[in-house]
Image: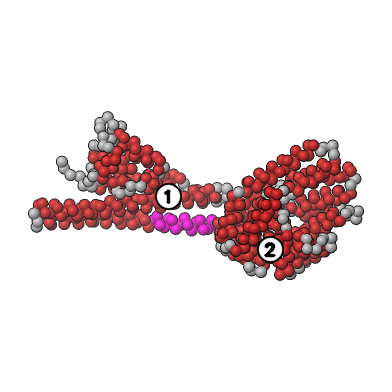
């Protein structure tokens, strides 16, 4: 009991403090609760398991058995429709055998609650006609009036066509008034009921005041969720959207803590975020959770309500993803054009350098000309080395991002009917692009360092060379690692991303190669950096 009081107190402190937080912080708190929802479900399942154990001990005691079944019903009624219906039916069977009119009426009202929560309105009306409260106690009468009020209010929300809607609300108000006459003024139940009565009368200021009072006095998570959700709904009607979001978040958190699946809070929050905050990603995330909850509970009318907004949010989200994909394609195309221009510029520059070298050979002494030309070549090659290394890495980054988008879109749309979109992304296309990139890298690098393979193999003895290099215009994986290092790409993380290996694998390759070389490990990369970009005669 002390633990339960502490948890409730902690939640109340949180509910009060969250008012001063901005919406983003509140949403982050909600996300953390959603991530921890399984813990609350396990706690409820553990409690239910204990109640099941109690049932086995009381099969021969009808009074205690009804009490056990009622407790199980209370746990299941907002968690799982089928189980709640089963135990409500059980209490009715036992009550009918015992002839307890009061208990029969209560059991029927429990069944009626199950019907309502699952959207079975006709069945609810049929069952209500069978309930006779003329010989029932005050508690049962109150239960009847509140259930009937909810039936008519839910029908008004479900059927918005006039004059039927107004007629349902008027009847709901009648039963709310009857329930209020049996409640103790200023009690939390009275405040919740009078606030709902004010809401249906569209007296929003009074409803807000009473709902806030009810929240302060209430210690039940389910009631807290109902009151907070109702407050959030009122704030949406008065265009106070940040206040509405905060209250609905309070309700959603209370639903999570009570493992309630028959809920409206997440649906309301998703709709608000989509329509008023344009937060498509979060709206999609919350509406999917709301649909899962409604499916777990088997709440038919909740699934219909969610079905009205889910396709709209989903379409908007797909449009956003497509725009991002198109942007990445445009960026990749631009990078490719720049790469082609770079190659052309390199060819032109090389031709100009050759002309300059010939001209200077006719004017200056041989040694002076060689010194100047070598200095300029060293300078140019240094810049060129760095630029090529960074350029290839940038190409990889774009391919990697595009690959990520492909996978993300395929994953999210795999269960939908967007076959043409899914078919347009093929892993084989990405692999083909990657192989072309490696081939282009090898060719360009060996043009810049034509003696790289020869100098690289000199760093090993004959016994340590696993096999001769069969293709003079390609590099194997070990050579590519040290080719990138020669270009100035030293970080293993960048090398791993470019070559599509893990950092661990890259480091393993580097260590393996260094261990095979006759050069000391700490000197190996220095030897690689000494390989010249222009092949010289010995």
Identify which residue is drawn at 69% across, 43% down. Answer: 45
Earlier sequence position, callout 1 versus callout 2: 2
Residue 328 to residue 478: above or below: below
- Residue placed most toward the observer, 222 or 389: 222
Provide the residue designation for mark 1. Answer: 400
* Residue 276 locus on image (x, y percent): 59, 65
Left or right: 208, with 393 as reference point: right
Identify which residue is drawn at 78% across, 63% down. Answer: 186
For label 2, the SS is: helix
- Residue placed most toward the observer, 414 or 385: 385
Q: Is residue 132 visible?
A: no
For label 1, the SS is: helix
Q: Quadrant of residue 353?
A: bottom left
Give the main secondary structure of the magenta stretch: helix
Residue 343: within the magenta?
no
Q: Are marks 1 and 2 in contact (CB under 8 Å)?
A: no
Of tags 1 and 2, the one toward the viewer is 2
Q: Which mark is residue 366?
A: none
> What's drawn in magenta, residue-wise?
311-333
* Residue 356 locus on image (x, y percent): 16, 57
Q: Is residue 504 visible?
A: yes
Identify which residue is drawn at 68% across, 65% down. Answer: 234
Which residue ends up furthest to the front in the rendered image?
A: 2
In 3D space, how far apart are the residues under numbered discs 1 and 2 (Cα atoms)?
46 Å
- Residue placed most toward the observer, 222 or 274: 222
Q: Which mark is residue 231?
A: 2
The figure's colour scheme reads secondary structure
Left or right: 61, with 188 as reference point: right
Neighbourhood count class around disc 1 (C-alpha, 10 Å): few under 14, some 14–19, many 20 upward: some
Residue 210 to residue 495: above or below: below
């Amino acid at each position: 009991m002390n633990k339960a009081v502490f948890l409730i107190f902690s939640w109340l402190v949180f509910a009060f403090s969250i008012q001063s937080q901005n919406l983003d912080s509140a949403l982050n708190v909600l996300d953390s609760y959603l991530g921890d929802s399984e813990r609350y479900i396990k706690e409820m399942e553990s409690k239910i398991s204990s109640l099941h154990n109690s049932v086995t001990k009381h099969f021969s005691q009808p009074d205690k058995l009804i009490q056990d079944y009622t407790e199980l019903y209370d746990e299941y009624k907002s968690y799982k429709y089928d189980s709640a219906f089963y135990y409500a039916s059980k209490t009715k069977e036992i009550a009918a055998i015992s002839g307890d009119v009061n208990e029969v009426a209560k059991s029927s009202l429990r069944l009626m609650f199950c019907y309502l929560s699952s959207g079975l309105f006709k069945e609810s009306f049929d069952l209500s006609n069978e309930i006779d409260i003329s010989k029932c106690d005050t508690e049962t009468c109150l239960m009847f009036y509140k259930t009937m009020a909810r039936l008519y209010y839910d029908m008004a929300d479900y059927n918005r066509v006039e004059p039927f809607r107004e007629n349902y609300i008027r009847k709901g108000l009648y039963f709310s008034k009857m329930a209020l006459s049996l409640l103790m003024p200023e009690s939390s139940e009275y405040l919740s009921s009078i606030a709902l009565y004010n809401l249906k009368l569209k007296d929003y200021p009074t409803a807000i005041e009473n709902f806030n009072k009810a929240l302060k006095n209430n210690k039940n998570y389910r009631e807290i969720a109902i009151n907070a959700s109702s407050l959030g709904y009122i704030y949406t009607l008065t265009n106070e959207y940040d206040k509405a979001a905060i209250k609905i978040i309070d309700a959603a958190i209370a639903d999570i803590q009570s493992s309630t699946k028959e809920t409206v809070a997440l649906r309301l929050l998703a709709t608000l975020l989509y329509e008023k905050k344009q937060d498509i990603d979060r709206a999609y995330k919350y509406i999917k959770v709301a649909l899962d909850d409604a499916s777990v509970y088997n709440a038919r009318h909740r699934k219909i309500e969610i079905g009205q907004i889910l396709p709209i949010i989903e379409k908007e989200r797909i449009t956003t993803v497509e725009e991002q994909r198109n942007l990445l394609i445009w960026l990749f195309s631009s990078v490719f054009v720049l790469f082609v221009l770079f190659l052309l510029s390199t060819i032109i520059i090389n031709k100009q350098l050759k002309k300059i070298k010939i001209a200077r050979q006719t004017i200056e002494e041989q040694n002076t000309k060689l010194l100047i030309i070598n200095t300029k070549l060293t300078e140019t090659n240094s810049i060129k080395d760095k630029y090529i290394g960074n350029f290839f890495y940038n190409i990889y980054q774009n391919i990697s991002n595009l690959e990520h988008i492909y996978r993300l879109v395929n994953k999210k749309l795999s269960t939908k009917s967007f076959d043409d979109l899914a078919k347009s992304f093929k892993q084989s296309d990405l692999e083909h692009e990657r192989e072309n990139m490696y081939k282009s890298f090898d060719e360009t690098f060996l043009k810049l360092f034509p003696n790289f393979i020869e100098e690289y193999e000199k760093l090993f003895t004959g016994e340590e060379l696993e096999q001769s290099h069969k293709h003079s215009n390609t590099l194997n994986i070990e050579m590519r690692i040290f080719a990138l290092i020669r270009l100035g790409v030293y970080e293993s993380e960048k090398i791993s991303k470019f070559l599509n290996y893990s950092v661990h694998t890259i480091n393993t390759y580097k260590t393996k190669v260094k261990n095979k070389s006759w050069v000391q490990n700490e000197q190996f990369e220095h030897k690689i950096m000494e390989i010249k970009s222009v092949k010289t005669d010995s």
